[in-house]
Image (spheres, helix red, strand yellow):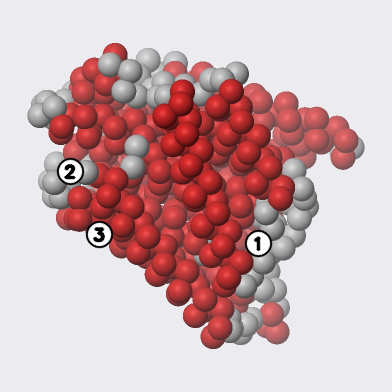
Amino acid sequence: MLEIALLAVASALALVGAWVAARRDSPEEGAATVRSTRHLRDDAIVATAASAALFVVVAIGHRRSGAVTFAAWSAGACAAGALASMGARLWRERVRGSRAAGAIGEIAIIVASLGALTALAAFAAHAIGDPQHLAAQVPEMVVSFAVGCAALDMADLALPAVSAMVLASYFFDANAGVLRSAPSYASALGIVLFPLAVIALGALGAAVAISARRPQVAGVLALPAAAAAAIALLGWLWQPFALCAAIGASMTLAPKLARDPRRSEIVALVAFAFAAIGGYAVARHSGLTHSGPFGVAVAALAAQSAALIERPAENETEPAIADRQANALAAIAIGLAVLDGATLFRCTRFADAAHAPSLDTATMLAHCTYASLAPARIDISHPATLASALGGIAACVAMRPDASLRSRITTSVIIVVALAATGLIAHLAFGVGVEAVAAGTIASSLAAALFPAACSRIVAATIAAAALALGAVIG
């Protein structure tokens, strides 16, 4: 219960900070923009269609008792993501005079909504009294939330947090025995909510910087924000992951040290490589199983918080270097989350089908790994994964959806069908279906992050959300 209370306070502070920043930074004539009734109707239609489609897919994909219940939760989470996206979009349009205040409010609304959904699931699963058993239920719910955001072209806001929560679920389950018996208690609820707390406190730091008329210090404030979240929610694990967050936030600050634009690009690439490798290595130094991918996700979250006020405005094709770095690092975490979500789902379904004991999740995951039921890695040299990666990049370059209802639905259907077909063919022909989908996700997200003028971020985010859903709710 304490973990939820801490996140609630952080989210409330972020929302208040966004409001104060908007009042301080926005000119009076910049407010009072209202989204048209037609656009709101289109958003509602797309969100309803996405929720209904997800309900059907999950009900069919589970193939076990209680499938309808899981499908209902997934559809509800998808609707919650769509509603949160509508609220975030309305906020940004009302504070159109300040791009920074709009970005802060957007992310604060998304995080608060995702935190409320996770808390509701914790109460429904009776995880408040025993928070150790929440982790296995998180991936399906949060990826459904991301699908709802993707339906309204807002998935890039939720994807870093969602992928980190999926990786956190796998990380806790793989080390459940150690974490439960550790000298300093670390609960599944705290580890799963940690990504949201990092973003909420990072948004609060950005709001303070804007209100104080010092936007240049917003990236620096992400460092103590991430450290505070780690100390509050991770218990004895706070040190390695606070250091991962520091590496991610520092990555976005490095290019600002170079005055020459050409050198800034080179420094940005070097810092990105260092952050990806450093986040993985520092987390692995903790000695816990599968801590490396979670360390990369934590670094990506901190980078997103540090680059928050540099998020591009709507239809802007040349975002700041820091924003591109943060999205590139998040692309790696999203691809890893596709693998982990599929592993959790496959292993749980296998244990249910075999009537095997599943209370010791770490042992269950180890047995699934030995039985080759879990996708272990992405082999980019494999023809299927290489073709999927190239196909993901081609989709981002070729597809440019406009704001019309027909274009949005058509684009989403094409992406989902193509991704599902790619995974199915790769699975039946080579046995690497999830790996191919993950490769396409990483390639498209990296291309959109590094070359936003040539590759559509909206298409890349839709591919990522669909891939996470295919892995975590179908397997």
**Where in the figure is residue 388, as x and y percent of width and height?**
58, 34
- Residue 157 left/right relative to 234: right
**Where in the figure is residue 315, as x and y percent of width and height?**
72, 63
Q: Which residue is mark 2?
A: 64
Identify the residue at horizontal 60%, vertical 48% (top origin).
460
- Mark sitting earlier along the chain (1/3): 3
Identify the residue at horizontal 56%, vertical 20% (top origin).
382
Q: Depth check: 40 or 292 in front?
A: 40
Marks 2 and 3, how far apart at CA: 14 Å
In the figure, 442 relative to 466: above or below? above
Q: Depth check: 304 or 383 in front?
A: 383
Give the numbered dot on residue 60.
none
- Residue 338 left/right relative to 69: right
Marks 2 and 1, how far apart at CA: 37 Å
Asked whether residue 430 is in view, the answer is yes
Q: Which residue is mark 3?
A: 72
Q: Secondary structure at mark 2?
A: loop
Please name the amino acid that badge 2 sits on. Arg
Q: Secondary structure at mark 3?
A: helix
**Where in the figure is residue 372, as x and y percent of width and height?**
33, 18
Q: Depth check: 373 or 32 in front?
A: 373
Please name the amino acid that badge 1 sits on. Pro
Please rate how many residues cluster around mark 3, counting C-alpha atoms within 10 Å: few if below 14, some from 14 to 19, many from 20: some
Q: Are marks 1 and 3 in contact (CB under 8 Å)?
A: no
- Residue 107 left/right relative to 100: left
In the figure, 225 relative to 346: above or below? below
Q: Secondary structure at mark 1?
A: loop
Q: Which residue is mark 1?
A: 401
Identify the residue at horizontal 51%, vertical 23% (top origin).
378
